[in-house]
Structure formats: structure tokens, C-alpha cells
Amino acid sequence: MMNAKAIGGRKLFCGDAIEKLPRRSIAALCCGLCSYPRPFIIHHSSFIILTAALLLSGCGFQLRGAAALPFETVYVEAPLTSQFANQLKRMVTTGSETRVVDRPADAQVLLHILNETREKQVLSLSGGGRVREFVLRYRIFYRVTDNKSANEYIGASEIVLQRDFTFNDNEALAKEAEEALLYRDMQNDAANQLVRRLQTMKLVTKS
């Protein structure tokens, strides 16, 4: 049953045009219709906000103070071009009270990114001998010491992640973009794993 509102002595249904009504009548109509039950509608702006929130959570974004790291300052030793190191710095800065400093001497802890590798291996072939699947691997090697490297809090360790990746010669450009996305996802995951390992670290000095 269609909702109706009496305007100017006649009933106006929801489907009627309102362009010719006086402004006061239009205002009265809007106020009146607001009192009627309406179905729940997800507006476009709400959908964008929800999607952004899911993407931020997927990439490891955390509110400040969410990660309780057992040190106040850290220096990340890695090549300037390391995307992993840059992401890890952002994650520590935005997700904890720990400060990332620019000089080793100012840091309570040194995080050494020893190596970062990407591997791509054939997983399966089609009947015609063409590649049908790859396995992608992402490795991070690291260690954690004090600012003089005298005390080693975490010895040389490794984080390894892998993803299976289907391939099609006819979709080469699309598959190249998908491969880059998978590596970026593994990089995000590795940074999250490393932050969690840092949370459980004990600052024990050698006597």
C-alpha cells in the first residue's frame, strides 16, 4: 500500500511529482514522510566508508596504542628502497606508542632487516606444457638487538609466506597486476607478523 500525505486538500502519493507544489507544501511533505517506516538503505557514502574500513584492517592498519611494544624507540636498519621497511615503520608509528627514530644512537632497539626476497616457482602445467599455476613466496630475514648490537633480543629469524597463483597467457597484463597484488598482500601480512613477534619480545641483557 502506497503512503499518502494530504497537501493542499488532496492526497499526494509517493509516486506523484512534487515539482509544482509550493515550497512550504514540499517542506511539510518531507517532514510528514519522515515519520513513516522506511526500509533500511545502505547509502553510497556509507558503503564507501565501510569498504575503506575493511581495506584498512586488511592492510594491517591499527589505532594508536593497539600494539603494546616492550620498547619506547626503535631504529629500522634496511635499504632506503625497502617497501617492507617503510610499511613496518608506518605500522609501528600508527599502531603503537613506540617512536621510530632516524639514528641508531637514539633507539632503545635496533631492528635489522637482513634480507627480503620474492620467489616464483612453477606449480603445475597444462596438457600442452604451458604454465597453469605458480607458487609465490615472500621471505623476510631479520634480527633485533640493542643500539650497540651487544645484546641480541631476537636472533636471525625468518618469516615466510606463500600464495598459489593461476596463470593464463591470454590474460598476461591482468595476471601481472594480480601477482603484484599478491606480493603486496604477503608484505602486509609479514609486517603484521613481525609486529606481533616484537610484542612478545623480552628485553633481557646479557651479564
Image (tube, rainbow, N blue to C red):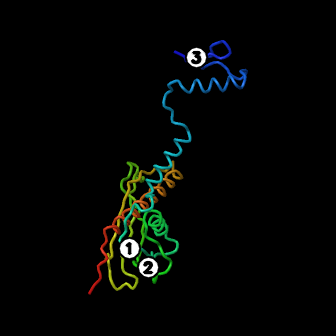
Percent of width and height locating residue 69? 37, 68
**Residue type highlighted by circle 2:** Ala
- The residue drawn where x is 51% and y is 26% is 38
Query: Mark 3 packing: few (<14 Cα in 10 Å), some, or many (20+)?
Result: some
Residue under label 1? 71
Which residue sits furthest left? 207
Q: Of 154 and 180, which appears nearest the observer?
A: 154
Residues at circles 2 and 3 in contact by the CB criterion of under 8 Å? no
Percent of width and height locating residue 182? 44, 56
- Residue 150 lies left or right of residue 25; in this view the side is left
**Residue type highlighted by circle 3:** Ala
Q: CA distance from mark 1 to mark 2?
A: 9 Å
Label whose residue precedes the other's in the sequence (2 or 3): 3
Percent of width and height locating residue 206? 28, 84
Percent of width and height locating residue 64? 45, 61
Residue 60 picture quarter? bottom left
Query: Mark 1 packing: few (<14 Cα in 10 Å), some, or many (20+)?
Result: some
SS assignment at label 1: loop
Which residue sits furthest top? 10
Compared with residue 154, is residue 9 higher up or lower down, i.e. above or below? Answer: above
Between disc 3 and disc 1, the foreground one is 3
Residue under label 3? 4
- The residue drawn where x is 31% and y is 68% is 200
SS assignment at label 2: loop
Query: Mark 2 packing: few (<14 Cα in 10 Å), some, or many (20+)?
Result: many
Residue 18 picture quarter? top right
**Residue type highlighted by circle 1:** Phe
Q: CA distance from mark 2 to mark 3?
A: 70 Å
- The residue drawn where x is 67% and y is 20% is 17
Label of residue 107 in the image = 2
- The residue drawn where x is 48% and y is 49% is 53
Compared with residue 68, is residue 80 higher up or lower down, i.e. above or below? Answer: below
